[in-house]
Amino acid sequence: MADADAAGLLRTAGWGVLALADGDRPYSIPVSFGYDGEAVYFLLVGQSPDDRKFAFVGDGQPARLLATRVNARFDWGSVAVTGTLRAVDRNGEGWDRLLETLGESDWFSPTFDAADEVSGVQGWALEPDRVTGLEVRPDQ
């Protein structure tokens, strides 16, 4: 997949699977995300005191996001973004960029912090070291 096509998929997919690890313990979760051409932004929302995802995510930790577009059996694409996680401070200047980028996604609800069951919200950026894509089209 061409770099421009991979960037286009990341800008429009809006959701994917985030893979994390703690030593030899893998963990993956679905996330809604936004992509601004430089980083992938997402939020992790706490819904219980023992949310496992928070044990696997950390500033400076490696991560991989897999985003897909599937139109039909022989018409699909996927992009893997591998890089380093960076915490986005809710009171810092990066928070507005995170919300702006996420706001461009159809999968993101800006009312996330109004929900009664939300106990904590953490903002994250995945800064890519490597972006790879693969696609199959009906005309190939």
Image (cartoon, helix red, strand yellow):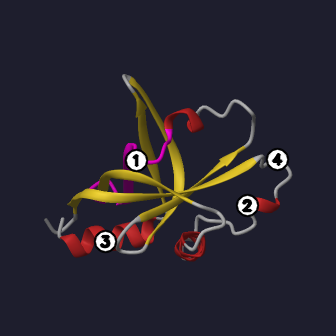
**CA–CA distance between discs 1 and 3?**
23 Å
The disc at residue 112 is 2
Q: In this view, does 125 lie to the left or right of 110?
A: left
Label 4 close to label 2 by CB (< 8 Å)? no
* Image mark count: 4
Q: What's under tag 3, amino acid-wise?
A: Ala
Which amino acid does the dot numbered 4 rest on? Glu
Check residue 60 in the rendering and tell me which mark sits there, or answer none. 1
- Which comes sooner in the sequence, label 1 or label 4? 1
Cα distance between the residues tagged 3 and 2: 26 Å
Q: Distance between the residues labelled 1 and 4?
A: 28 Å
Q: What stretch is highlighted in magenta?
A: 57-77
Circle 4 is placed at which residue position? 117
Asked if the stretch drawn in magenta spans residue 65, the answer is yes
> Residue drawn 42% across and 38% down?
20
Give the x, y percent position of residue 90: 65, 63
Classify 10 Å Cα crowding around label 2: few (below 14), some (14-19), many (20 and above): few
Residue at horizontal 66%, vertical 34%?
Answer: 51
Mark 1 is surrounded, within 10 Å at the Cα level, by few (under 14), some (14 to 19) or many (20 or more) other residues, namely few
Marks 4 and 2 sit apart, C-alpha to C-alpha, by 10 Å
Q: Mark 4 or mark 2: name the one nearer the start of the chain.
A: 2
On the picture, is 100 further left or further right than 67?
right
- The image quadrant of residue 105 is bottom right
Magenta region, mostly helix, strand or loop? Answer: strand
Q: Picture quarter containing residue 68?
A: bottom left
**Label ID, residue 7:** 3
